[in-house]
Each structure stands twice: as structure tokens, then as C-alpha cells.
Amino acid sequence: MRRRRRGANRPPAAPKPPPAEIKPEAIVAQSKGLRAVLAGCGVPARDLDDVLQECLIGAIVAVREGRYRPAPAVDPAFVLRRWLVGIAVRQAAKYHEKAYRRREVAVADPLAHAAGQEQSPHAQVEARALLKLLWLVHPRERTVLVLVSTGELVTEVARRLDLPGGTAFSRLRRGRKRFAAVLARSRSPLR
């Protein structure tokens, strides 16, 4: 018996509505609401104007390129507000992803680093990358891995987590195996 193709029962996609023209003044008129959305997304007051400007410019460019396609049956003012809120949320996410905006300092004391008293900042960057990879391990196994890596004995971890000793040992073994597989995948050149 042949297997049915996935999505075979779905109706064809509805055609996209045509691009709509909006004057830049109508987009700029939504600035007050966008400012509140950006503040709600955690953009600090000192950077609100810059991120708001990125939102407005991005919206105006998108309209000129024909990427604003509201459904004709919906209230145009409502659709415009929702579309601009989506742009603002994405711009706030981009804002938070930038390292220089997070105020990250690669070296705690630059003068001590220059004198050769501190570790290389590359070690901190590599440690952060390994911690991100550790999140790909199942939470039960990750908990045991982290507790054992802090110096606790597996029997103490089992007692602390209220687990049988064998379960703690097997979670540690599986966690090490999965973390090794995650590391191998991350370092493979064909990612």
C-alpha cells in the first residue's frame, strides 16, 4: 500500500493580496505606539530613538519594495499597527543580540590583561560557546553533568536529586555521551 504524501489534503494556498501603498507620514504617525512597544521589549531609553528610527526606515523601505500586503477585508489602520509592531519586536530582538549593546566586556581588567596577569579573552568566549552547547543535552542528564562537574560525587548528586544511585550513574553516562556527540557535530566542517 502506498503512503499518502504529507499535506495532500490541504487546499491550495490563497493568493497573496496585492502590495499596498502607504505614505511615509502614516508610518511616522505610529511612532508613539512603536516607542511603547520597544520600551516594553526592554530597549533602554538611551537607545529608543535609534531603534525606533531603524523600525521606521525598515517599514518605509518594505512598503517601497512591495512587501506590505494587507488583506483587503481587514481594517487598514489595524493591519498597519500590527505590521509595525511586528517590525518593532524584530528590531528589539536584533538590538538585544548585538554584543556591543549588551555591554559585554571580554576582559574584566584591561590593564591587568595588558600586563600579562589575566587569561586570554578567548577562553571566556570558548566557555560561553560550550555552555550554549550544553543546553542541547536533555535537562535530566544536564543537571547531573553540571553537579558532577562542580566536584560533587555521583552518590551525593543522587541523594540531592532524590534518585537511586544507578539512575544517577546512567544519567551521567548518557549525558557525557550526548554532550560528546553535540561537540562532535558542532566541530564538524559540514555543518
Image (cartoon, rainbow, N blue to C red):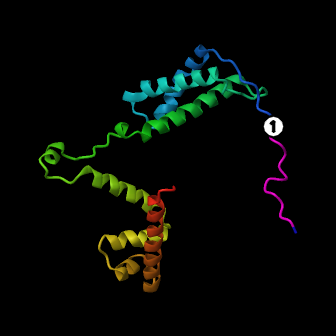
Residue 154 sits in quarter: bottom left
Quadrant of the image occupied by residue 109: top left
For badge 1, the amino acid type reads Ala
Q: Give the range drawn in magenta.
A: 2-14
- Relative depth, front residue between 51 and 118: 118
Q: Can residue 160 be seen in this view?
A: yes
Residue furthest out toward the right = 1
Residue in the image at 23% along x and 46% along y? 107
Q: In which quarter of the image is the N terminus?
A: bottom right
The answer to whether 185 is drawn above or below residue 160 in the figure is above
Q: Front-most of 150 and 64? A: 64
The vertical placement of 158 against 29, above or below, is below
* Extreme residue toward the left, this view: 115
Residue pictured at 15% horizontal, 45% vertical = 114
Q: In this view, does 75 lie to the left or right of 140?
A: right
Coordinates of residue 126 in the picture (x, y in percent):
34, 55
Q: Is residue 158 magenta?
A: no
* Horizontal and vertical percent position of residue 31: 53, 22
Q: Relative to 61, is 178 on the left or the right?
A: left
Which residue does the numbered mark 1 point to in the structure image?
Answer: 14
Q: Where is residue 90 in the image (x, y as percent from the top left)?
A: 53, 36
Instruction: Give me the residue at 39% from left, 29% from top.
Output: 47
Disc 1, SS: loop
Label 1: how many residues lie within 10 Å, few (<14), some (14-19) or many (20+)?
Answer: few
Asked if residue 3 lies in the magenta stretch, the reply is yes
- In the rendered structure, the answer to whether residue 12 lies left or right of residue 185 reads right
- Report the residue at 47% width, 76% height from top: 174
What secondary structure is the stretch in magenta mostly built from?
A: loop
The answer to which of 31 and 4 lies nearer the viewer is: 4
Q: Can residue 41 be seen in this view?
A: no
Query: Residue 138: where, in percent of width, then height?
Result: 50, 67
